[in-house]
Image (cartoon, grey):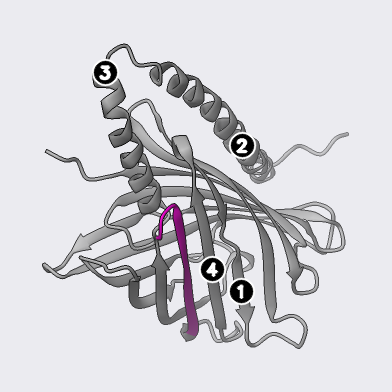
């Protein structure tokens, strides 16, 4: 007699299928929307009158400005990125980990000279049990809000500085650190010509939380290089280097390399930033992933000009 499937097991199976569906759905959306938008651009690029031809440079300029704003962590523009990170080959059974980051960016004007940029990352995690070839945990990971103070009228060097926090919102012990952590964060970038080049770095230390969980001392460094091309296309490399300063020797750093391609375009009337990237890890802790894939759709809400 077969054992009946429990409701909890059914929920886990459904959630795993949903998570596994996210990367191909995002990738197909990137490819199909890019093809449709290219066809639309080609049809619109054939001007019926001189007025259409004259307006084309302005439209391209707007797209380039929107691309640079989307690639700027402290831009004065509301955006809502949905970023899916899939890590392959985890543990001895080559399991797959999946993290969907919901990370809204909200700029707030606090004075004539200063903006406060609130960046909140809430992960939804599928964490496989690396000690066996099945089962795992899913749910919310730890929330990571960051608040950058940045000049409202930036110069050639754009910058922001402020606190970052890790809040223990994980719904299972395996999905988070169980600690409240905090530390400083800094972002620096410049936008010469068609380039957006910069870096974002922070380090957090645990200051409260469960006494049964190990203390936290970790760094995140993300450098990014974007080259913007015609019709909203761009090349991008933005690897995330992490360091767990409390780990044993040889397991401190994760050092990825790679990149991908993206496009600024519209889905209907909604401006979006689509991005697909692949990364390999030159250095990584024992039992973690040697390579990963990042897919993103970022909803953009630029200020409307009267």
| 3D distance between C-alphas at marks 1 and 3 | 53 Å
At x 46%, y 20%, the residue is: 42
Question: Which residue is the site of mark 2?
Answer: 27
On-image quarter of the C terminus: top left
What residue would you read off at disc 1? 242
> How far, Cα to Cα, is label 2 from label 1?
26 Å
Q: Which of marks 2 and 1 is nearer the N terminus?
A: 2
Q: Mark 3 points at which residue?
A: 50
Q: Could you say where residue 200 lies in the image, as x and y percent from the top left?
A: 47, 71
Label of residue 78 in the image: none
Query: Looking at the image, which is closer to me, 251 or 191?
Result: 191
Front disc: 1 or 3: 3
Distance between the Cα atoms at labels 4 and 2? 23 Å
The CA distance from mark 2 to mark 3 is: 38 Å
The reply to whether callout 2 and callout 3 are in contact (CB within 8 Å) is no
Q: Kindly check if marks 4 and 2 are in contact, taking CB atoms under 8 A apart as contact.
A: no
Q: Distance between the residues labelled 3 and 4?
A: 45 Å
Q: Give whichever of discs 1 and 3 has the lower sequence position.
A: 3
> Do the numbered discs 3 and 4 sit on residues whose CB atoms are within 8 Å?
no
Q: Nearer the viewer, mark 2 or mark 3?
A: 3
Q: Is mark 4 on a helix, strand or loop?
A: strand
Q: What element carries label 3?
A: helix
Helix, strand or loop for disc 2: helix
- Residue extending furthest top? 48
Q: Give the range drawn in magenta.
A: 192-205
Mark 2 crowdedness (10 Å alpha carbons): few <14, some 14-19, many ≥20 = some
For image coordinates 35% across by 45% down, the residue present is 66
Q: How crowded is mark 3: few (under 14 residues within 10 Å), some or many (20 or more)?
A: few
Residue marked by disc 4:
222
């Amino acid at each position: 007699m077969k054992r009946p499937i429990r409701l909890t097991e059914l929920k886990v199976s459904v959630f795993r299928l949903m998570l596994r569906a996210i990367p191909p759905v995002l990738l197909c959306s990137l490819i199909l929307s890019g093809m449709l938008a290219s066809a639309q651009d080609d049809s619109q690029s054939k001007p019926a009158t001189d007025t259409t031809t004259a307006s084309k440079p302005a439209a391209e300029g707007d797209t380039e400005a929107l691309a640079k704003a989307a690639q700027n962590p402290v831009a004065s523009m509301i955006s809502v990125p949905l970023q899916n990170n899939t890590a392959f080959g985890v543990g001895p059974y080559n399991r797959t980990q999946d993290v969907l980051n919901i990370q809204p960016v909200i700029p707030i004007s606090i004075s004539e000279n200063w903006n406060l940029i609130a960046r909140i990352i809430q992960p939804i995690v599928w964490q496989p049990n690396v000690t066996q070839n099945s089962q795992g945990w899913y749910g919310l990971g730890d929330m990571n809000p960051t608040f950058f103070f940045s000049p409202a009228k930036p110069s050639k060097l754009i910058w922001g500085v402020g606190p970052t926090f890790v809040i223990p919102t994980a719904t299972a012990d395996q999905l988070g650190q169980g600690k409240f952590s905090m530390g400083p964060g800094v972002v620096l970038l410049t936008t010469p010509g068609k380039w957006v080049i910069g870096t974002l770095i922070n380090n957090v230390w645990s200051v409260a939380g469960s006494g049964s969980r190990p203390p936290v001392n970790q760094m995140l460094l993300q450098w990014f290089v974007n080259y913007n091309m015609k019709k909203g296309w761009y090349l991008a490399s933005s690897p995330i280097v992490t360091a767990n300063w409390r780990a044993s020797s040889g397991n401190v750093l994760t050092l990825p390399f790679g990149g991908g391609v993206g496009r600024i375009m519209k889905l209907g009337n909604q401006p979006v930033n689509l991005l697909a990237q692949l990364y390999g890890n030159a250095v990584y802790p024992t039992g973690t992933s040697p390579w990963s894939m990042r897919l993103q759709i970022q909803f953009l809400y630029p200020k409307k000009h009267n």
